[in-house]
Image (spheres, grey):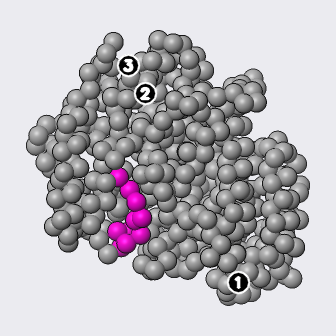
Amino acid sequence: MSSRRLADKILALVARGPDGDPSEFDDLALEVFSHQYANNAPYRAFCGAAGVSPEAVTSWRDIPSYPTDAFKKDIVASFPVDEAVQANMTSGTTSANQRGRIFRDELGQELIYTANRVMTGAYLFPDFGEGQRCRILILAPSPEVAPTMGMAIGMDQTREHFGTPDSAFMVKRSGVDVKSLVAALRQSERDGIPVALIGATSAYVYFFNACRKKGMSFRLPEGSRIGDGGGYRGRFGVVTREDYYELCEEVLGVPSSHCVNILGMAESATNYADDVLRNHWLGKTGERHMPTPPWTRVAAMSPDTGKPLPPGEVGLLAHWDLVNLPTVIGVQSDNLGYMDDRGGFVIIGRAKVVDGKVSELPSEKTVGPMGDKAVFRLLEAYVNFSIEFKMGRVTDQDEKSTWEGLREEAERSKGSDAEVIASCPTVVEEMVAGADDPEARERADRALEVLAGETDVEDDD
């Protein structure tokens, strides 16, 4: 079957939304696997080593899940790569030539945009009627700043389909535009129009703590909401998930029922979201839950046997997603988690290896929404520090030690992640290059001067 006809079948399933019939998945999964086996050489080799072919597969459970690390070594595409229209950056690579990217052709782009528009509408804006919009404030870089960052591209799609014209990205090349963010929040308070904030969990935490130190808080109108990504691995920064919800209500006046956690992976296509706001709108009760839509399946796999585990048992989460038509349907992550008794899943942390075996206890290392590679940690640290700096929460000595630490991080990343960065905020970009380029160091210093001109934020109210 042609990729166009397969895509149309998948799009029809996606269009029926999260409440559609999940029974169509299995037959479509077999068709997608057969297509990818025939057209994706790295995946075919991987399946061959496992002794699996389309003739031997009778269920989606039999389809091999491709490890996320393998995306860093090969171009994993089920279409001619010269037809690619999008390349999303992964968290690192061992090959400078392939740059650790996930390629998508026009069909793949249509699939991922459609699926995530449906998921965003169902879980972040379940109360919106057809064509309804609100002001969206995004605590992440825009595609103009970071054109290969999947987070930036996805949030821009959300802005385009659900945002009013005054929606905006709050992370500029000089860091988070705290003054504009504060002004926008105050404007929402005055005009009574709800606002949606979307971004990285840790950026919210830094902003909330900075507001708390300055005695600054907001009471956003009823119906305002927050979508965060990155806090799904248990701890982030120095607060727990429960602490985070308390901060959302204390600083912004947004209750936990309107705080939606979102999971996205560069190697997979569909973004998952917990159903707390959707259930609130529908009048349902129960613990928040991250369900799987009809076009995906998730399983916790035993590190010892590679077989699916029953609900409640911790394993390595694997994802099968029909929207991954241009790459591979099955993706094996290194996230530890478990399935619940409602068919959803919970991530508890990044896997760690003890004595050559995967431990059921997650790594204690905090992993941010941009990944755990050096250059992504550098970018996240820069964004978070810019909040601290512009809110007037750091001293000159703090500033000096922080930037020295970031430069050291940049130098450590040289020769690995630095090679795959196509674009990121100017300061970070120049700091990475500056490890052995004096001119780049000078450009970074000039960029830092822009940041230094915005050292404090005074509340107009």
The answer to whether residue 422 is magenta is yes
Q: How crowded is mark 3: few (under 14 residues within 10 Å), some or many (20 or more)?
A: some
Proximity of marks 2 and 3: CB atoms separated by less than 8 Å: no
N-terminal label among 1 and 3: 1
Tell me the residue at 44%/55% (across/down). Answer: 146
Q: What element carries label 3?
A: loop
**Closer to us: 101 or 397:** 101
Q: Which amino acid does label 1 sit on?
A: Arg
| Main secondary structure type of the part rendered in magenta | loop
Residue at image position (31%, 54%) is 426
**Is residue 226 at all visible to an observer of this figure?**
no
Residue 129 image offset from top left, x and y in percent? 75, 27
Sequence-first tag of 2 and 1: 1
The answer to whether residue 139 of the structure is visible from this angle is: yes
| Residue at mark 3 | 217
Which disc is residue 247 wearing?
A: 2
Q: How crowded is mark 2: few (under 14 residues within 10 Å), some or many (20 or more)?
A: many
Q: Single out the mark in the foreground, 2 or 1.
A: 1
Residue under numbered circle 1: 44
Which one is in front in this view, the residue at disc 2 or the one at disc 3?
Answer: 3
Residue found 49% across the figure and 51% down from its top? 143
- 47 to 344, vertically: above or below: below
Q: Check disc 3 and give the amino acid type.
A: Ser
Asked if residue 158 is among those painted magenta in the image, a careful observer would answer no
Q: Range of the magenta residues? A: 416-425
164 lies above or below 368: above
